Image (cartoon, grey):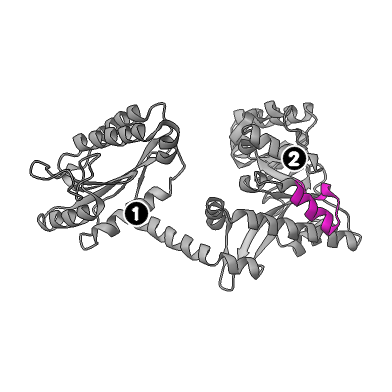
Amino acid sequence: MVEKSTENTSIEDNSIDQLTGFYNISSFTDVAHEHILANPKSSFDCLAAYVANMDKLNSSEGRAVGDAVLSGIGNVLKEALPNAVGARLADKFFFIIDTKDRPTEVETLAILNKVRQITAGKDAYVQFADYRNFNKNLSTSTVCDRALLALSNIKDERTIWYIRYTDKLNQVKNREHVLESHFDRAISEGQFFPVLQPKFDAKHGRVVGAEALARWKDEHEMIFPIEFIPLFEKDGHITEIDEVIFRKVCQYQKDRDDRGLTPLPISVNISKRTILMKDAAFKYKSIVEEIGIPVELVPIELTAVFASGDEMTVDAINRFIGEGFEIHIDELSTKLTFFAHLDKIPITMVKMDKRIMDTFIGDSGKVIIKHIIQMAHELGIPIVAESVEYQEQVDFLRRNKCDAIQGYYFSKPVLIEEYEEMSIHGLKK
């Protein structure tokens, strides 16, 4: 039942996709609904397949190649799902499958391998989502939309080929919709603000600076970064948040200077989207000059993976360096080979993140941490250990001459007022 027989149907029958022989989407919803009603004792799954980058493939290799890819993938799916009701809509395939006919894990991997043979060496690749044992009272369109919703969570993630729809996923998407709808108001009302996690001199325990972290508080609740940062990185709003946090940190640094307080650098995390924006370095330097503080007081903090990127990324980072910004590298665990890039990006500080510090519990982990510190020092780069929580870690880092420590052992991220108190009077005993 995967396709409609064309024996007695003219080629102009617009209920059929002429490229693959599957139903078109409007006919599919009707036929799938009838199929479900005709099998009241069965449970059903919806499988969706998305052929990513088809526009790019059609542009680079021609429509004929793109059509051949879609047709080939359709043939693989037709063979693998002989009893399903299937449809194609542009670069997406949909199937309603009796649960008992769902492919096993081994069969699914075989389908994937056949599809990958078709897309090998091409821009296109395929991702799958399923919605298992769906409520048969839902319309076919709603069921397919939910499978697509699942697929949207792995869009542009070429290494992830499968995701399953769950009600929790739907809740997350609804929550994201609420956050996105409130974004403009949050910006205009100043609801985004920085908290500061202090950095302490490892030897003496004095505050030597901080890292700024974005927070969002509306009239009802505190919204934490795990919710809004990934969302706004995807939709592009992160560039506006970056600028808001950077401006507020610069303004605080100016305020400290006006009151004669000791200048201490506060690093600001800047997203990949912002760094790669045209004239971003010039824009951020202009903010510093407008507010009237030394550029050294607001280092830019980047992840090791991003900073180890392609030539365009390296050039963008070096434009910030050219404007006088210091570059701090975080999440070293994600790219321990970053040190090999120092000839391209002259950084001024590196951080051992939680993944590295979590290895501390084993002897081999202590050796790794010790040698990372030594390597940074031999390269003339100060090093910070973050996510430090225990006295034993502090003692070890001090013995091995780590330069600074950041983590809950000394302080969680705090409001600017608390940070200022700490930076003037030290930690409360």
Query: Is 291 colored magenta in this rendering?
Result: yes
Q: Please tell me which residue is depicted at 53% across the width and 57% down the height of the picture.
A: 227
The residues bearing labels 2 and 1 have C-alpha atoms spaced at a distance of: 44 Å
Report the residue marked by disc 2.
319
Q: Is residue 275 above or below residue 176?
A: above
Residue found at x 56% / y 73%: 220
Identify which residue is drawn at 85% across, 54% down.
Answer: 293
Decide: few, some or many residues near mark 1? Use Cα within 10 Å; few <14, some 14-19, many ≥20: some
- Assign the C terminus to one quadrant of the image: bottom right
Question: Which disc is residue 302 wearing?
Answer: none
Q: Amino acid at mark 1?
A: Thr
Q: Residues within 10 Å of mark 2 (few under 14, many from 20)?
A: some
Left or right: 306 in relation to 207 = left
Name the mark on residue 166: 1
Q: Quadrant of the N terminus?
A: top left
> Mark 2 belongs to which amino acid?
Arg
The residue at the far right in this view is 260
Asked whether, in this view, residue 20 is left or right of residue 258, the answer is left
